Image: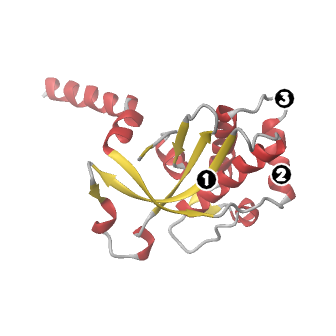
Amino acid sequence: MEKSLKIFAISLLVLILFRGWIYRNTINYNQIGIRETITIINQDLVSKIESKSVNRIIDLKEIIEISNAITIEVLSFSSKRVSNDPNELIQTKQANCIGYSALFNSIANYLILKNKLDKQIEAKHLIGQLNFFNFDLHQLFDGPFFRDHDFNMLRELRGGKTVFIDPSVSDYLGIDAVSSR
């Protein structure tokens, strides 16, 4: 019994410590569409972005960090019908994967434009399907809520470095990057 408990504890610790690596190597996001960026006009959201980005040298890493931090701070996940407009989400604080990705993307694009990085970095709000070892997970569900899943892509235009982020997974599992083809 004691040996079984130790094996279980060690296994659990490994799963927790390597959850990001395990997730990225078992779950793949296949892009099936793209959503338009929603321009931020809400002054509360602008103020929050400005306060988080003051005295920071804005690059790809900082854009991801700031966008993710604000998104996670502001939102709580909801499976109900909620707004996907970042200008409203700052007040309602409830979102599904579309709202999480919309807010993240709008913040990233705000920072890119504000810092005149639009010739160096691009950010896109993507629609995808999740595959577990090439098995489409969405076929297991009937409802429209599970038809697809939104995530984000940020790319350095000159260096070619591309990072895929799922802000809702980042919020609940602490996994900051995901895999996509």
Q: Which element is circle 1 on?
A: strand
Front disc: 1 or 3: 1
77 up-or-down from 10: above or below: below
The amino acid marked with disc number 2 is Val
Q: Is residue 43 left or right of 52 when viewed as pictured?
A: right
- Quadrant of the rendered image containing residue 5: top left
Total numbered circles = 3
Q: Which residue is mark 1?
A: 124
Q: Residues within 10 Å of mark 3 (few under 14, many from 20)?
A: few
Q: Quadrant of the N terminus?
A: top left
Q: Residues within 10 Å of mark 2 (few under 14, many from 20)?
A: some
- Quadrant of the rendered image containing residue 51: top right
Q: Which residue is mark 3?
A: 55
State the residue at coordinates (37%, 41%): 23
Q: Which mark is residue 180?
A: none
Horizontal and vertical percent for residue 38? 72, 63
How far apart marks 2 and 3 lie (CA) works out to 16 Å
How far apart marks 1 and 3 lie (CA) works out to 25 Å
Q: Which mark is residue 46?
A: 2
Which of pointers 2 and 3 lies earlier in the amino acid sequence? 2
Horizontal and vertical percent for residue 165? 53, 45
The amino acid marked with disc number 1 is Lys
Q: Is residue 9 left or right of 38 when viewed as pictured?
A: left
